[in-house]
Amino acid sequence: MKKIGISTEYITLGQLLKLGDCIATGGEAKMFLQEKKVLVNGEPDNRRGRKLVPGDTVEVEGCGTFTVTVRKA
């Protein structure tokens, strides 16, 4: 499980995919989410704007599992 640290209140699913190296650019998120199975906290989700907060877990088909954490300053 990979940790994605954020210093803001939330991060979008599209941003997480980019930070997690699942996609190269944010523009690829829409197509990626249509083609791959993504689970947010165990529930299917394909909204690139889905807000993720620390504690959320995202499973991405072919890319791995990520946990959103608070980045320490």
Image: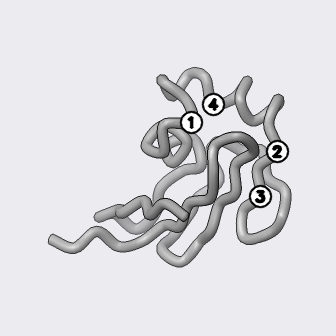
Q: Quadrant of residue 28?
A: top right
- Quickly name the residue at label 2: 37
- Mark 1–mark 4 distance (CA, rounded to whole Å): 9 Å
- Quickly name the residue at label 4: 29
Position of residue 32 relative to residue 65, above or below, is above
Residue type at mark 2?
A: Lys
Q: Please state which of residues 25 and 22 is positioned toward the viewer in this rendering.
A: 22
Q: Earlier in the sequence, mark 3 or mark 4?
A: 4
Q: Is residue 34 left or right of residue 18?
A: right
Q: Residue at x 51, y 48 (%)?
A: 16
Q: Please state which of residues 52 and 61 is positioned toward the viewer in this rendering.
A: 61
**Residue 73: percent from the left, percent from the top?**
15, 71
- Mark 3–mark 4 distance (CA, rounded to whole Å): 15 Å
- Quickly name the residue at label 1: 22
Count residues near mark 2 (Cα–Cα under 10 Å), then give few for <14, some for 14-19, many for 20+.
some
Residue type at mark 3?
A: Leu
The chosen color scheme is one colour
Q: Earlier in the sequence, mark 1 or mark 2?
A: 1
Q: Please state which of residues 72 and 27 is positioned toward the viewer in this rendering.
A: 72
For mark 3, give the secondary structure.
Answer: strand
* Mark in front: 3 vs 4: 3
- Quickly name the residue at label 3: 39
**Residue 39: percent from the left, percent from the top?**
77, 58
Q: Residue at x 79, y 53 (%)?
A: 45
Count residues near mark 3 (Cα–Cα under 10 Å), then give few for <14, some for 14-19, many for 20+.
some
- Mark 1–mark 3 distance (CA, rounded to whole Å): 14 Å
Give the label on residue 33, or none.
Answer: none
Instruction: Verify CB contact (< 8 Å) between mark 3 and mark 2.
Output: yes
